[in-house]
Image: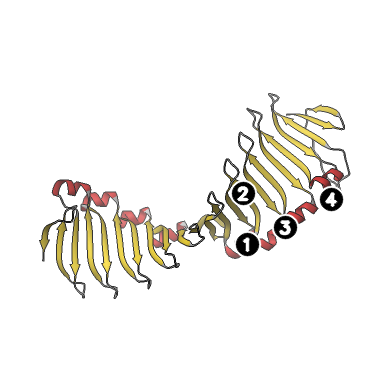
């Protein structure tokens, strides 16, 4: 690797690695400004490191800046800035890395927090994401080891809409702080007024195997009451029970009034129907079941829906088969 060093107006070309090391006591001598450029074997610049004197660093707020280049185009792709202690104490982070697109716009900024802020907030790094016109779209905060051990939190994520409002937020947790590959996620979604409208839980592998579903979605009305919930079933559950999704509906008192059961494609082909809807009385007893036939059954027999009615004791009293326009085709009492 070829390296070029510029210092006090003199250019030096080296074929060895150049290092700038502060003294063991942490005191840096007040040297002149320097620029070190690293090249590949084709003389394309790979990295440029700029060192600043103490006087200039105090004025700028940073003592070192590292530029990374695209090896093919030579375009600047990253800008890493290492802040002075005074600036770090003021801002709460000691290092930043900006990632740029082909037009030089910032797409992502990594901020590494100071030890004091990390201990207080529990996050050692924040990553800010931006769209092509500079609007903030997402912030990710990565938890410290101590926070993960105490609360199992690994990462906290916030997504924003085009107006800068919080669209949703998500927390990623570890089932075991010593094994961070088995995680579960809890997310909240908000409307434009900031009201919570949905909660999403993505379960860990361990929990999914126990529960039989890997994702649950809970929907809320304008007053924060749960009115709907979805369960998405695991492959093992589908294979055993032939059900791919369950949906529950609730009244204002929180009691379930309806349940929708969706069958897997293979099961639907065998059964002749793809969905069953169970309706319940306020007492919790089943009052009616609607079963919806597959496209194949409808095209060959004209059957669209089978409705089964029950009495107060959940005893079946009547069955009706309807066409697509709600016309009764067949009845059994």
Residue at the image position 20 percent from the left and 56 percent from the top: 305
Residue with the mark numbered 2: 128
Residue 177 at least partly seen: no
Disc 1 from disc 2: Cα separation? 21 Å
* Disc 3 to disc 4: CB gap under 8 Å: no
Tag on residue 115?
3
Q: Residues within 10 Å of mark 3 (few under 14, many from 20)?
A: some
Residue 219 at least partly seen: yes
Image: 196 above or below 295: below
Residue 137, horizontal then vertical, whole percent: 56, 48
Tag on residue 26?
4
Mark 2 or 4: the one toward you:
2
Q: Earlier in the sequence, mark 1 or mark 4?
A: 4
Describe the element under mark 1 as helix, strand or loop: helix
Disc 2 from disc 4: Cα separation? 31 Å
Residue 183, horizontal then vertical, whole percent: 51, 56
Mark 3 or 2: the one toward you:
2
Residue 83, horizontal then vertical, whole percent: 76, 48
Q: Earlier in the sequence, mark 1 or mark 2?
A: 2
In the depicted view, which residue is nearer to us: 3 or 140?
140
Describe the element under mark 4 as helix, strand or loop: loop
Describe the element under mark 3 as helix, strand or loop: helix
Disc 1 from disc 4: Cα separation? 29 Å
Residue with the mark numbered 1: 147
| Quadrant the C terminus occupies | bottom left
């Amino acid at each position: 690797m070829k390296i070029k060093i510029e210092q006090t107006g003199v250019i030096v070309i080296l074929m060895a690695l150049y290092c700038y090391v502060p003294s063991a006591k942490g005191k840096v001598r007040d040297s002149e400004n320097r620029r070190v450029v690293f090249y590949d074997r084709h003389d394309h610049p790979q990295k440029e490191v700029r060192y600043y004197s103490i006087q200039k660093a105090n004025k700028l707020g940073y003592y070192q800046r590292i530029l990374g280049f695209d090896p093919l185009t030579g375009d600047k792709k990253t800008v890493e800035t290492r802040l002075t202690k005074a600036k770090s104490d003021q801002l709460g982070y000691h290092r930043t890395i900006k990632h740029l697109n082909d037009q030089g716009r910032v797409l992502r900024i990594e901020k590494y927090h100071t030890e004091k802020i990390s201990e207080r907030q529990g996050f050692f790094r924040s990553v800010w994401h931006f769209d092509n016109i500079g609007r903030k779209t997402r912030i990710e905060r990565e938890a410290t080891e101590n926070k993960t051990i105490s609360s199992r939190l690994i990462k906290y994520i916030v997504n924003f809409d085009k107006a800068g409002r919080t669209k949703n937020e998500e927390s990623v947790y570890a089932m075991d702080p010593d094994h961070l590959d088995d995680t579960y996620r809890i997310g909240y979604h908000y409307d434009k007024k900031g009201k919570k409208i949905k909660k999403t839980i993505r379960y860990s592998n361990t929990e999914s195997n126990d529960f039989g579903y890997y994702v649950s979605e809970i929907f809320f009305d304008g007053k924060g009451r749960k009115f709907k919930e979805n369960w998405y079933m695991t492959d093992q559950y589908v294979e055993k029970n032939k059900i791919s999704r369950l949906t529950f509906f609730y009244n204002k008192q929180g009691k379930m009034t309806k349940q929708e059961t969706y069958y897997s494609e293979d099961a639907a082909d065998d059964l002749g129907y793809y969905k069953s809807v169970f309706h319940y009385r306020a007492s919790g007893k089943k009052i009616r079941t609607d079963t919806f036939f597959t496209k194949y059954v409808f095209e060959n027999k004209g059957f669209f829906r089978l409705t089964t009615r029950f009495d107060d004791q959940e005893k079946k009293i009547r069955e009706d088969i309807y066409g697509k326009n709600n016309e009764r085709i067949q009845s059994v009492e």
